[in-house]
Amino acid sequence: WKCNGSLGQAQELVGMLNTAKIPADVEVVVAPSQVHAATVKASLRADVRVSGQDVWKQGNGAFTGETSAEMLKDLGAEYTLVGHSERREKGESNEVVAKKAAYALEKGLGVIACIGETKELREANKTVAYITEQLDAYAAEIQDWTNVVIAYEPIWAIGTGLTASPEQAQDVHASIRAWLKEKVSPEAAEKTRVIYGGSVGAKNAPELSQKEDIDGFLVGGASLKPDFLQIINAQNPTDNVGGAVNVAINGFGRIGRLVLRAAATNPLINIVAINDPFISTTYMEYMLEYDTVHGKFAGSLSHDEKHIFVNGKPIRVFNEMNPANIKWGEEQVQYVVESTGAFTTTETASTHLKNGVEKVVISAPSSDAPMFVMGVNHELYEKNMHVVSNASCTTNCLAPLAKVVNDKFGIKEGLMTTVHAVTATQKTVDGPSKKDWRGGRGACFNIIPSSTGAAKAVGKVIPSLNGKLTGMSFRVPTADVSVVDLTARLVNPASYDEIKAVIKSASENEMKGILGYTEKAVVSSDFIGDSHSSIFDASAGIALTDDFVKLVSWYD
C-alpha cells in the first residue's frame, strides 16, 4: 500500500490494519511518505512492514531531498520501493534505479523493484521488450535476489479508467518469471514474488490472486481504503476482514464519556449514537468538553437538539429510560457499550439486541454473562456470545499479571489489595450508606476499607486460579489511577529478578499493549491516561523468600 495522502489518512489506514484479519501467509507492507513514516511505524502492529517510497543510490551525505537506506533503517523500515512509475516520470534511468536497489539491498533493506510500460508501448506490442530492459538493468547491479520483490505496474492502467484483464496481467507476470529463470536462476524464478499494480480493487483482486504467477498487489490511493482489507484476504474472501464497527453507548457517565474520548482517536470505532435519559445534548457537549482528570477535549464539539457533533461527525442522542425503546436500528448500531451500571445481567442487557444490535459489551462484572479480560481469556470468545462482560478495571489489572506469573511459576495462593481512586458511588461528605457504612464516609478525607470481587473474578477468567485468590480494597482520596498489590505464594520458587524478567518479556511480546512494565521511580499520577490494562512496577515489588512475593501493578 503506497499510503499517500494526509497524516490523518495514514493514521486511518494504520487503525484499520491494526485490527484487520491478516492471513498467516500474507505479508502486508505500507509505504507512507517519508514525512509520515515515523508516526506510522510507531503506531503500526508488529506484523505489518514499513517501506520507504524511494531511496537514494548512496549513503548519508550532501544529497538534499534524498532519503538514504541508512535513514530508512534508522526508522525501522524493512523495505523500500524503487523505480516507481511516478519516479521514472521524473527522468530516472534504468541504471540509476538499479543502483538504488543494489545499495538498499547492501544495507539490509528488502526492495520492491517496480517495472512497467506506457499505453503507447502496450499498443505497439513492446511490453515484454521494454520491461526486459528494466529487468536487465536490475540484474546488472543485483547479485542476490533473495530480498527482491518485483512489482509490475502497467502505467496505462493506473488512474486512467483502463484496466488490464487478469489474463493480460498473468501473461506479463509469466514472462517475468521466465526472465528470472533464464537470467538469474531457476531458484529465483520459483521464490521471487512478482506482484501486480494495475488498478487493483476488491472486485478484481480475488480473480487476479488465482493466477499462477501473480503473488500479490501494489495498491494505493485514499479511495481504496475500504477495499484494502478485502484485497489482503483476496485468496480467501470473507466478510470478516476487520474495519470500523458502528458502536453506541448506553449511559453517558464516567465510563461512557471516556469510551467516547478513546474512540474519537480510533478509526475502527465509529460511535454513532448515545442514550442517556438524564442528559440533554447541551449538557452532554459540556461534559465531554471538560474533564477534571483528563483535561479539555482535544477536538471540536457542537450540538443540536438530537445530536452532538464530535470533530464534525454527528452522533445521535436518545433519552430513553427503557433500552427496549431505543431506536438503535435507525443508526445501524452493531455494538452497544452498556455502561449505565443498571443492566449487568444477560437478560437485561439482551434488551438491546431487540433493536437490531449484534453484540452488547457490559462495562462491569456480570453475574451470568461470559466475562473476558484481554490478553487472558479473550481467545475463548465464541461468535454466538452476544452479551459479554469485560469485567472490572481491577480484574483487568490483576488478571494479566496473575496469568503471566501463574503460567511460568504457578500461584499456590494469593491475597490482593487494591489502593483505589475515588468513584462516582462514594460520598463527597459523610452520608447514609445502608449496605456499606464505611462507604458512606467522606471520600475526600478518608482511607476507606472496602470489599472487592476483583480477585475472585480472576478465577472466572483463569480457572486454574479459582479459589486461590481473594482480596480487598482501600478507597483513597485521589482522582484517578489505582494500584494492585498482589502478595502470592509460588509453586515453583524463583528469584525476584527472574520474575521481573518473565513479566518484562510478556509485556514486549504476547501481552504488548495490555501489560506494561516500568523500572522508573513513578507515582500514581504518572499513569493518568495510560491505556495499558496493567503496568507492572518492577522497582516497587519485594520478595521475602523465593516462593513468597509481593508484586505491584498500576492501572488507570
Image (cartoon, grey):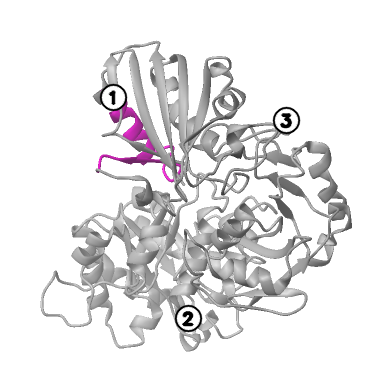
What amino acid type should be assigned to the residue bearing mark 2? Ile
Q: For mark 3, what is the residue? A: 367
* In this view, 9 is above or below 271: below
Asked if the residues shown at circle 1 and circle 2 are in contact, with their CB atoms under 8 angstroms apart, the answer is no
Q: Residue at x 56, y 49 (%)?
A: 428
| Mark 3 neighbour density, 10 Å: few (under 14) some (14–19) many (20 or more) | few
On the image, the x and y values in percent for residue 205 come to 61, 63
Side (left or right) of 435 relative to 28? right
Judging depth in this view, the residue of 96 and 126 nearest the camera is: 96
* Residue 69 is one of the magenta-drawn residues: no
* Quarter holding residue 40: bottom left
Taking depth in this image into account, of 80 and 126 the one nearest to the observer is: 80
Label 2 packing within 10 angstroms: few (<14), some (14-19), many (20+)? many
**509 in the magenta segment:** yes
Labelled disc at residue 512: none
Amino acid type at image mark 3:
Ser
- Mark closest to the chain's N terminus, 1 or 3: 3
Residue 521 point in image, percent of width and height: 25, 43
Q: Is residue 104 above or below residue 556?
A: below
14, 342: nearer the viewer: 342
Q: Which residue has dot 1 on it? A: 542
Between discs 2 and 3, the one toward the N terminus: 2
Find the magenta span and give its range: 498-520
Disc 2 marks which residue? 155
User: Could you tell me how far apart the alpha carbons at marks 2 and 3 are, in whole angstroms?
Assistant: 61 Å
